[in-house]
Amino acid sequence: MATSQKADLRGSELTRDQSKIELQKSVSNADRMILKAPMDGIAVMQSIRRGMEFAQARAGDTIYPGQGFMQIVDPSSMVMNATINQVDAELLRIGMKAVVRLDAYPEVVLPAHVYSIGAVPVAGRRPNFMREIPIRLKLDKMDARVLPDLSASADVTLDSEQQAALAPLASIFQDGPAAKPFVLVHSATGWQKRQVELGLKNNVFVAVHSGLTQGDVVAIDMPTEPRASASGPPL
């Protein structure tokens, strides 16, 4: 075999070997593009930045290492991602009961509990000086209408009382900061002043341990006459 033929053969062998290497790289890259779900569930696409806008990932987009673009959601075990004002975060504890309401289905009320509480605050949608703590609520009961990425709200029960009378918060009066609270109860002779012992309260109602009984009618404004007409609903 002539020297030139040997050189051509050797060049062809090198080209063949290089092509095998390129083929192996292509197969390896193709394998890296196959995503295997670690669990059964629903694939939910997330929005990624594309130029000056956010949109779902599509063919041709560049996905960088560590960048999230999809989630696998188990429809039988759903959680709600939420945030709470940093001022109120100290009141929460893991395991506290809550109720979740879906904006799309106002009639759906689902029981839940606090599943996790974030350790680092994040910037909220309010002005930058308002920070929020991320939390997760795990739904204790499922509904077929619950889908990933639905907007929802939640009320967390910080504490509770059983068999307590409730009075409107506006019906509680005090003569001074150190004075005992009292209510004005409507009677046949006018408004009667009664001191009350208070319990838990929210922004609307307060629990009354003593001083009121079921059916009492209380004033929600300080009466100006013995028989003022302004009164709250029966307890």
Image (cartoon, grey):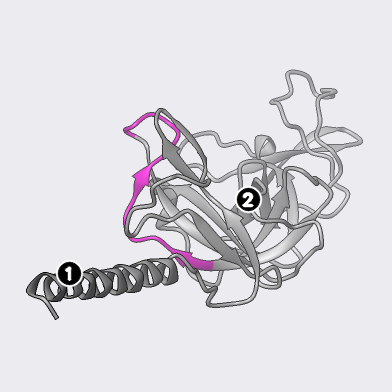
Q: Residue furthest front?
A: 2
Visible in this render: residue 198?
no
Could you tell me residue 78's position as x and y percent?
A: 64, 66
User: What residue appears at the point 44 percent right and 50 percent down from the top-left corner?
Assistant: 88
The numbered mark, 1 or 2, whose residue comes first in the sequence reads 1
Q: Amino acid at mark 2?
A: Asp
Can you identify the residue that label 2 sits on? 149
> Where is mark 1, residue-wise?
8
Measured as percent of width and height from the top left, residue 96 is found at: 56, 68
Q: Indicate the secondary structure of the residue bearing disc 1.
A: helix
Q: Nearer the viewer, residue 138 or 48?
A: 48
Image-quadrant location for residue 109: bottom right
- For image coordinates 41% across by 28% down, the residue present is 52
Mark 1 or 2: in front is 1
Query: Which amino acid, mark 1?
Result: Asp
Magenta stretch: includes residue 38: no
Q: Is residue 114 left or right of residue 143?
A: left
Image point (47%, 61%), residue name: 92
The Cα–Cα distance between marks 1 and 2, rounded to whole angstroms, is 62 Å
| Residue found at the very far bottom of the displayed protein | 1
Q: Based on the displayed image, in which of its 4 quarters is residue 175 positioned? A: top right
Report the span colored magenta: 115-129
- Prevailing SS of the magenta stretch: loop
- Above or below, 24 against 65 in this view is below
- x and y, in percent, of residue 147 in the image: 71, 56
**Would you place residue 7 above or below residue 166 in this image?**
below
Label ID, residue 20: none
Q: Quick one: which residue is furthest to the left in this view? A: 3
- Residue 183's x, y, as percent? 69, 40
